[in-house]
Amino acid sequence: MLEQLHQMTLALGMELSSDQMDQFRRYKLGLEAWNQRMNLTSQKALARIEQVHFADSLSLIPVLRHWAPDAQRMVDVGTGAGFPGVPIKLALPHLHLVLVEATQKKASFLVWLAGELGLDEVDVVVQRAEETARVPQYRETFDIVTARALGLLPVALELTMPLSKVGGVVVIPQRGDVASEIRRSTLALDELAGKVVAVESVSADGLSQDSVAVVVKKEMLTPERYPRRVGIPSKRPLITAL
């Protein structure tokens, strides 16, 4: 079981232990069981979970190791069923992981999952990202911030940059015309005190789709006015006209 995942991780330069592979197996079984009661992921994605969720999440690890080699704290914003945060935690168990998810049902799954997999130092925060970024214990405290499904890059930046500490990195997987997305994010980067330092390929044989990770370094404290109140970042994104 999960032989594809084993081969993909080898292609990424990682070798998971038998205990780690068993955690991924139980993750898959738990997701299948809970998905019968609530919509955690599509049936199509669930049928290809090794590529669509697990390997895609793990493909960020070489990027994280390069840009944040000493990281201790990571937050995954809008994590849904735990992607990419939980697979990264399984491979890098020393990380203190915070999972931010606004939907209570999905958050309940994440709490169950952390217990089922025996994960230490995993916190589930049931909030919108705009609210979490206002909590003193979270604002500008993380070495790594990631998010996989927050929409346009300028929107994702406003919802993630306030959580990164100065010198930390925000790592956002992207597909499509990434160069244009970065150009459209100039205003957001200027306002939020971030700088794109790399666009790293995270594709490997067997992964679901070719994609890249946009790596943004936090250069200064983000102004207190950001993020704006709930819903505003997506309604009025900080987009630079091209």
Image (cartoon, helix red, strand yellow):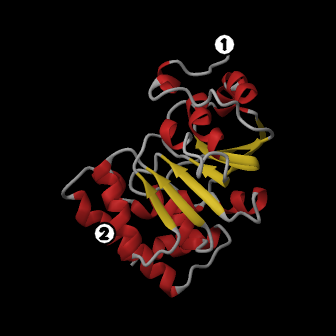
What number is the disc on residue 103? none
Relative to 169, 7 lies left or right? left
What residue is drawn where x is 36% and y is 75%? 116
Q: What residue type is labelled 2?
A: Gly
Q: How many marks?
A: 2
The residue that label 2 is drawn on is 30
- On the image, the x and y values in percent for residue 20 come to 50, 80
Picture layout, residue 191 above or below residue 88? above
Neighbour tally class for label 1: few under 14, some 14-19, many 20 plus, Cα within 10 Å: few
Picture layout, residue 78 above or below residue 5? above
Q: Which amino acid does label 1 sit on?
A: Ala
Q: Which residue lies furthest to the front in this view?
A: 136
Element type where label 2 sits in the image: helix
Picture layout, residue 81 above or below residue 175? below
- On the image, the x and y values in percent for residue 200 come to 72, 48
Q: Residue furthest left?
A: 37
User: Marks 2 and 1: CB-CB under 8 Å?
Assistant: no
Element type where label 1 sits in the image: loop
For the N terminus, the quadrant is: bottom left
The residue that label 1 is drawn on is 241
